[in-house]
Image (spheres, coloured by chain):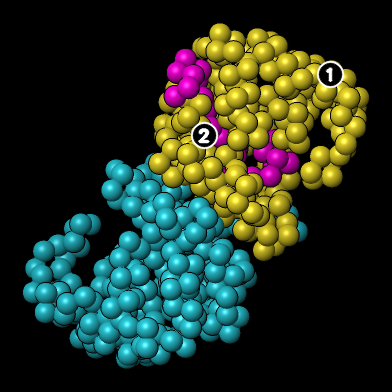
Chain colours: A yellow, B cyan
Amino acid sequence: MGTGSVGQAYASKFITLGYEVMMGTRNVLEKLADSARDVYGNPPFSAWLSANKSVKLGTFQEAALFGEIILNATMGAKSLEALKMADVKNLNGKILIDVSNPLDFSKGLPPSLLPELSNTNSLGEEIQKTFPDLRVVKTQNTMWNGLMINPAMLNGGDHTTFICGNSPEAKEAVMEILKSFGWQEGNILDLGDISSARGTEMYLPLWLRIWGATGNGAFNIKIVSLK
Amino acid sequence: MGTGSVGQAYASKFITLGYEVMMGTRNVLEKLADSARDVYGNPPFSAWLSANKSVKLGTFQEAALFGEIILNATMGAKSLEALKMADVKNLNGKILIDVSNPLDFSKGLPPSLLPELSNTNSLGEEIQKTFPDLRVVKTQNTMWNGLMINPAMLNGGDHTTFICGNSPEAKEAVMEILKSFGWQEGNILDLGDISSARGTEMYLPLWLRIWGATGNGAFNIKIVSLK
């Protein structure tokens, strides 16, 4: 779900790993006709798709129907709407890997978080509440997309990613996917149930400030602790 | 400002480093008479003070008048009230090292952040707005107090602390203090002006979830980045 740079990074990686991938978007024809660069200056989606011909493109509904595992890489403010367009009957019983953040660009830059989806709530929780039979696993929302799918590019792969969700089996399945990306098991920290997404999503304002101060998004945090 | 475990950790460290220290509290006689353990099971303040006789105790006002540098180690929800009791004339022109967090215990555990002091605001900013002639430096609110004053106990001292504030001179002075605690210059990351406190304070919910998941507060984050 989502055709931006995060969705593209995952789609390419999943294709490399032998998965079949359909990317979901609101309106397929509009998406293919859009020739503008995105807000970050990236080429239009159609150019990326031409270079990644084995990736299918469909509506949110078609992609959700197609997928055994669904990945939410839409803008956080639009995620619930996109999932509703996907239709609950195409989601029930499936795993949703939720890597999105409820960023609020309406109050200036750097963005804040959507008040109704932060502090005493989170986007991960709100998705889980809205779709009780979807198995939401929040992960990888705490870093630049290049690192999500290629942790080895930084510090020999020795840095931390978090995982939260209510279903131990779904978390286990997602951990296997993260390991296939190169994440070391000891660097995948299970924070508990989906309410822990409050923590990982509220880290984003710090991430944005570090990025702003250093001018370098290719960083992550590593948890170091006294044994 | 503040006589809890954070204030105690700093007071002991500053005494060791040769500073004169007066701790500020709301009511000196009540504080000395209180024989109860705190919510974390720590001994009463009077027991700590008996073992740290070179530390003076005064009201918030007396401590602010006494101090050339002021440290805010009060509960975040009470910090503005404590600083108002200290009296603006005892604060103006001085440096305030603000290590507090605007935790909200009213909505269950783990605590959330006070809505009016988070997301599009922060406690650090609110203190700066309330006392424009105080030079607020937000730092060290992102870790367990034992690490603040003794970074070397973990990972050879190689982990990250943040600093934010509007006055470069005040930040420079506080960086010197952090270095005297053992912080390595390359691990003190200047995030910019005091609005960056939004980032460091909003990290707390993640800190609390990591603590909850691991049962170990003696951890910190280290920023690792691609050069």
**How many numbered dots are placed on residues in this image?**
2
Disc 2/disc 1 C-alpha distance (Å): 29 Å
Q: Which one is nearer the viewer's eye here, A66 or A218? A: A66
User: What residue is drawn where x is 36% and y is 79%?
Assistant: B13
x and y percentages locating residue B149 in the rendered image: 41, 72
The question of residue A163 being in magenta is answered with: no
Q: Which quarter of the rendered picture does the N terminus of chain B lie within?
A: bottom left
Residue A54's image quarter? top right
Q: Nearer the viewer, residue B10 or A133?
A: A133
Q: Name the residue located 62 percent from the left edge and 31 percent from the top edge.
A: A78
Instruction: Identify the amino acid type marked 1.
Output: Leu
Specify start and end residues of the magenta stretch as a single range: A129-149
Q: Image height check: is A10 above or below A105?
A: above
Label 2 residue SS: helix
Q: According to the image, label 2 marks what residue?
A: A123
Position in image of residue A205 (x %, y %): 57, 52
In the rendering, which numbered label is found on residue A29? 1
Residue A112 shows up from this direction? yes
Quarter where residue A206 is shown = bottom right
User: Residue at left 55%, top 13%?
Assistant: A88
Q: Is residue A153 left or right of residue B122?
A: right
Q: Earlier in the sequence, mark 2 or mark 1?
A: 1
* Three-letter amino acid code of the residue under disc 2: Leu
Q: Which mark is residue A20?
A: none
- The chain ID associated with circle 1 is A
Instruction: Give x and y (percent) for residue B116.
Output: 42, 55
Going 40% across and 41% down the picture, which residue do you hit? A120
